[in-house]
Amino acid sequence: MIEILEVEYHIDLQLFAAEDEGRTEEGSERRRREEYDKGNIPKSQELPAALVLLASVITVYLLGNFLFTKSFELFRKYFQGIVGYNRFASEEMSKLFISAIADTLTLLFPVLGISLIVAIAGNIVQVGFQFSSGATGFKFEKIVPNFSRVIPSKQTLFNLSKSLAKIALIGWVSYVIISMDFYSVLISGELGIKGAFSLIAFSGLKIFIVVGIILFIISIYDYYYQKSEFEDSIKMTPSEARQELKEAEGDKTFVNRRRQMIQDMIRKGMLQKVPKADVIVVNPTHYSIALQYDPRIHNAPVVLAKGEDELALIIRRLAKKHEIPIVEDRVQARLLYEEVEIDAEIPAKFFRAVSLIISRLDKFRKVA
């Protein structure tokens, strides 16, 4: 009799779990800022390329007559004029080479300049004016072979599909346009050199314009795809979100505590000056301004202390404790609080109103 042994196999399904499984929380601003600092900014490389293609083709079309004439002049200058050279010394060749570079740059400057501006604008439109030291710094891991990049992933498959789509569309567009102009190209030999060149150039222009528009449309889709992928990459697990929130609250508590300490120090130093004030100008419910005026020292009254709401009540209590006159003037109290800093003399526009207040005080009335 044969006994059949039953063997149970246990497979750990976690081995097949996705790397980002459980990342259900949206990425925080802190994590987004950290990725920006590293240079990981969502943008499409296709958009600047498409804009540069369109801008350069349009520029060549608009400046076609100038570029053709200038190119012909350079050709005659350097290839036909070379017959006039009797000897080719190193000094003469150096001058000729420098002159050729300068003339070539002058010829290409409009196209290259506009292409550079459009390329910069294509990046600014996507990410704004952002500079990341992490993107420009040297990273050793970039030059180390990473074989994981050749393993099919969502990003690599998308890039492959995008490249194949571009090749197919460019080929199809070129075929359609060349088919439409095929008969005209066949009889271009009867048009002369200039006519044939214009016909072929115009066909090429149409191909580049249509291809540029197609690439531009693809780049817009690619931009939103890259942005979506970036947002997915910075998502967090619930535990990571709770930990980050706890750290953020801790940082916020520390900042608030530090700010409160600074305010307490300022209030403490400021409130110590209130007993030296000659008058307190108040708005009954909001503002209190402590003024001091000594004609022997000051050119104008000085704001010793000021406060709003709770601090204004403390200033009024100190004033009553030290028997300092309190004068109600809603408008002047608010303006003095908003426009005059502590330990500063009041501006000239307050002289008349404040002088009327001070003139009613017994201290200054006796002096007068």
Image: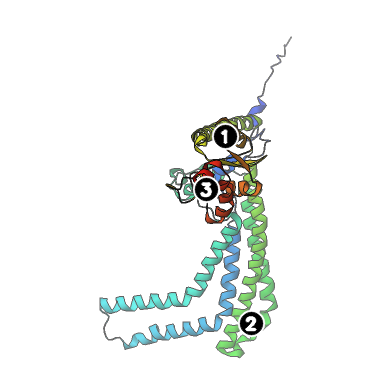
Q: Which residue is mark 3?
A: 39
Q: Position of residue 368 (x, y in %)?
A: 51, 48
**Res 259 quadrant in image:** top right
Nearer the viewer's eye, disc 1 or disc 3?
Answer: 1
Q: Mark 1 — residue?
A: 319
Answer with left or right where residue 137 lies relative to residue 310: left
Can you name the residue that lies furthest to the top here?
1
Mark 1 vs mark 2, CA separation in Å: 98 Å
Q: Earlier in the sequence, mark 3 or mark 2?
A: 3
Within-10-Å neighbours for mark 3: few <14, some 14–19, many 20+:
some
Disc 2: which residue: 185
**Front position in the image: 311 or 181:** 311
Q: Nearer the viewer, mark 3 or mark 2?
A: 3
At a point 49% along the width and 33% down the height, the residue shown is 272
Q: Is residue 303 above or below residue 98?
A: above
Which residue is more in the foreground, 108 or 321? 321
> What type is the residue that disc 1 sits on?
Ala
The secondary structure type at the circle numbered 1 is helix
Check disc 1: other Cα within 10 Å, few if <14, some if 14-19, many if 20+.
many
Query: Left or right: 189 with respect to 1?
Result: left
